[in-house]
Image (cartoon, helix red, strand yellow):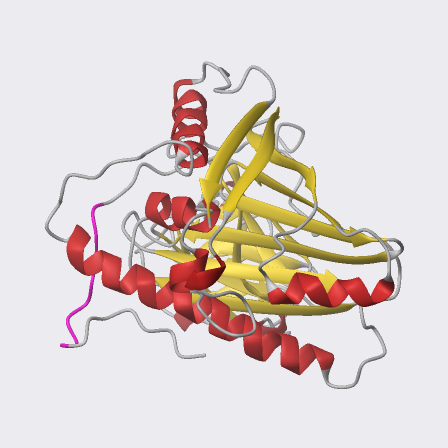
């Protein structure tokens, strides 16, 4: 799927920036791109990263900058154990960032190279992604015990299929996230015979409840006007879905139909303060034996994500001029909760915008 990030005239689009949330995990890239002995680059929260996989299989992420003269480490060498700067040959253990060798040191030097560190970030492999923990600026080395657990897609058995999708968005992470949780755009952005049409608009009522650093759309029957959900009716059992949103950027959905299930984790990750990327990871055991199901699912999923991407590109054209914006009730209530949760985390107050179960109504 092409990742379009420019206007039709070819001019890069960038909307206003957003305040970023640090001290959390973000997906940097797919780990199938990390081959032993090779380096790859990514950008998270405006930080240039170099990633790789050590000989022992462990993935790592470092700031793509040598602490000596600032040249990108990604233009150097990696032998599977050490990253070597191509400027002066300094060698670094990539998981810790510790300098192991400075070739220019002579017998007259008293500098202990092992006391020098390049910036290295905690990095783990989950569901085919390299997740990187990004601490706040100036926070120094963070205790391993303080870090939250890296996210992982929920699965309900050992036999399942998986798929993933990704797309760049030319807007800041706030616009990407409130677009992700917006319940009213479906019949307009995602009009298609295999999803829903504008003619299918009807009133809906959903219950929401608070969860730590987020909120949950309580377990409910999926939308009757969404064709994919109707397919689960062939199993002859009630279908139930639960949708969570948690800071800093995660939407999880679990659909259950007896012992059949579908699970997805969608993230909107800030690449810079004014651009972001959407990643979708999914797993399922529904129609497990159906031939070609995974490529079919990816084909329609890519069309779905592409519709969101095009809408964000079009929205970014308007956002360049800093227009006045508004949020309404009830369809925009989740967006209001997101901004309140984010501000609470940035302020350190821990205040939650929901003090109990809330019922919202909208048409979609």
Residue drawn at the location 87% of the way across and 66% of the way down: 159
Q: Position of residue 301 (x, y in %)?
A: 56, 71
Residues drawn in magenta:
9-16
Which residue is depicted at the point 51% across and 31% down? 360
Q: Residue 326, how many percent across, how many down?
A: 24, 36
Q: Residue furthest bottom?
A: 291
Looking at the image, which is closer to me, 15 or 228? 228
- Is 182 drawn above or below residue 212 in the view shown? below
- Whether residue 339 is visible to the viewer of this picture, yes or no, is yes
Left or right of 87? Residue 314 is left
Q: Is residue 293 left or right of residue 317?
A: right
Query: Which residue: 42% across, 70% down?
Result: 306
**Main secondary structure type of the part rendered in magenta:** loop
Indicate the quadrant where residue 187 lies: bottom left
Does 137 sit left or right of 286 as displayed?
Answer: left
Query: Where residue 22 sits: x, y (%)?
Result: 44, 36
Q: How many marks?
A: 0
Nearer-the-camera pick, 36 or 216: 216
| Quadrant position of the N terminus in the picture | bottom left
- Residue at image position (32%, 73%) is 4
Q: Quadrant of residue 294?
A: bottom right
Look at the image and say whether residue 13 sits in the magenta stretch.
yes
Task: Verify whether residue 289 appears in magenta.
Answer: no
The answer to which image quadrant residue 307 occupies is bottom left
């Amino acid at each position: 799927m092409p990742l379009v990030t420019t206007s039709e005239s070819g001019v890069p689009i960038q909307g206003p920036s957003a305040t970023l949330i640090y001290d959390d995990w973000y997906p940097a890239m797919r780990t199938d791109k990390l081959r032993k002995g090779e380096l790859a680059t990514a950008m998270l929260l405006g930080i240039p990263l170099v990633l790789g996989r050590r000989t022992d299989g462990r993935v790592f992420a470092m700031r793509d900058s040598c602490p000596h003269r600032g040249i990108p480490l990604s233009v150097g060498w990696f032998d599977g154990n050490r990253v070597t700067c191509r400027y002066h040959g300094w060698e670094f253990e990539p998981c810790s960032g510790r300098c192991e060798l400075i070739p220019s040191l002579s017998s007259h030097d008293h500098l202990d190279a092992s006391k020098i560190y390049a910036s290295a970030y905690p990095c783990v492999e989950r569901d085919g992604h390299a997740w990187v923990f990004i601490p706040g600026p100036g926070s120094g080395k963070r205790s391993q015990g303080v870090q939250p657990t890296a996210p992982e897609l929920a699965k309900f058995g050992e036999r399942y299929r998986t798929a993933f999708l990704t797309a760049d968005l030319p807007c800041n992470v706030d616009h990407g996230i409130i677009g992700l949780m917006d319940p009213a755009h479906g019949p307009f952005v995602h009009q298609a015979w295999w999803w829903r049409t504008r003619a299918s608009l009807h009133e809906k009522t959903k219950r929401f409840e608070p969860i730590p650093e987020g909120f949950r759309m309580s377990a409910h029957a999926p939308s009757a006007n969404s064709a994919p959900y109707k397919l689960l009716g062939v199993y002859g059992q009630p279908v139930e879905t639960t949708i969570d949103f948690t800071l800093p950027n995660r939407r999880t959905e679990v659909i259950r139909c007896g012992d059949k299930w579908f699970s997805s984790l969608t993230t909107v990750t800030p690449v810079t303060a004014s651009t972001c990327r959407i990643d979708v990871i999914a797993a399922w055991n529904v129609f497990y034996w159906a031939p070609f199901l995974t490529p079919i699912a990816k084909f329609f999923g890519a069309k779905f994500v592409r519709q969101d991407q095009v809408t964000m590109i079009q929205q970014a054209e308007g956002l360049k001029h800093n227009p006045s914006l508004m949020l309404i009730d009830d369809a925009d209530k989740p967006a209001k909760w997101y901004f309140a949760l984010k501000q609470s985390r940035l302020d350190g107050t821990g205040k939650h915008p929901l003090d109990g179960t809330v019922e919202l109504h909208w048409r979609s």
